[in-house]
Image (tube, grey):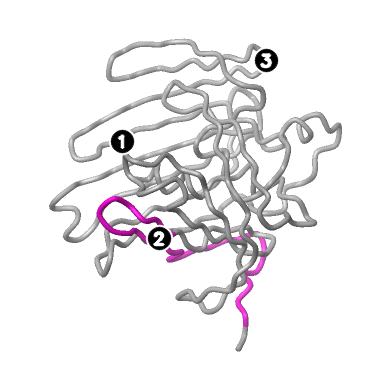
Amino acid sequence: MLKQIILVFLIAINWSFSQIISEPNLPPIESFQDGEWFQLRLHYGPFNASYASFSLESDSLNNKAVFHAKGFGETTGIAKWFFKVEDYYESYFDQKTGLPYKFVRDINEGGYTKNIEIDFDHDEATAFVHDKKRNEINEFSIEYGVQDLISSFYFLRKFYPKKGVKVNDSFDINMFFDNENYVFKLKHLGSETIRSKFGKIRCLKFRPFVQSGRVFEEQESVTLWVSDDKNRLPIRLQADILVGSIKADLENFKNLRHPFEILIE
């Protein structure tokens, strides 16, 4: 569950990773900060299905200054009785480059469990995947500048282009997940002002290209809205799936780096 939410939120801004990491002077962090927290509410029709929360804190890993990002998702209410979900995700990524060093995935989805830790060696272009359930460690080749599921979202928030992106532009990012290298593509649809529980918010609108046939009705079944301010915070997601539609909205937040911009009528 949390995986699907993150996958469609993580690619919100266009930027070339090869250009970023080759720059001698990387730009300072402008879109998030230590202590940030926000929560999304996922609902299916009139029913609350689950909540997903994301937190960020400064930390160190192997004497490197990192951000420690955590994602947690769980079903709630009636949905919890039919399909109990508890998903934990963590990422340790470099505070300057945004490169991930460690990724953790510990999930229980209706009895299906997985407990994985991934250590990234970017110099050797290798990911070491530790499957704790099977007590196995395997090595995989990774792409240049690869991101994990969680670090991608913060990476793109940090390096978004200040001049914006053109309507109908499509772009992608390299990611390593489930022992495979992926390329995710997304199209910018323009700007739109939407109503939220906090008021009217000016947003950037995107269309992720997703795999059709398994969960989503077709490749362009998902629409994503991200705040058009310096925070680049996910505001809304709407997805048409094979048995209806799912909507996720920003529910709560605290300690944002910039004031949350709400339009006054």
Q: Residues within 10 Å of mark 3 (few under 14, many from 20)?
A: few
- Local secondary structure at mark 3: loop
Report the residue at 63% width, 52% height from top.
33
Question: Residue 207 versus residue 177: which sits nearer the camera?
Answer: 207
**Residue 126: % across, % down:** 57, 14
Q: CA distance from mark 1 to mark 3?
A: 29 Å
The N terminus is located in which quarter?
top left
- Indicate whether residue 242 is drawn in magenta: yes
**Residue 127: % across, % down:** 53, 17
Rendered image quadrant of residue 143 = top right
Which labelled disc corresponds to residue 123?
A: 3
Note whether 109 is above or below 196 in the view shown: above
Q: Residue furthest left?
A: 81
Left or right: 18 in relation to 205: right
Left or right: 249 in relation to 145: left
Q: Residue furthest bottom?
A: 265
The C terminus is located in which quarter?
bottom right
- Indicate whether residue 71 is drawn in magenta: no
Give the magenta range. 238-263
Rendered image quadrant of residue 202 = bottom right
Rendered image quadrant of residue 58 = top right
Report the residue at 62% width, 62% height from top.
204
The amino acid at mark 2 is Ala
Residue tagged 1: 107
The amino acid at mark 3 is Asp
Question: Which sits earlier in the primary sequence, circle 1 or circle 3?
Answer: 1
Q: Are marks 2 and 1 in contact (CB under 8 Å)?
A: no
Note whether 157 is above or below 26 in the view shown: below
Q: Residues within 10 Å of mark 1 (few under 14, many from 20)?
A: many
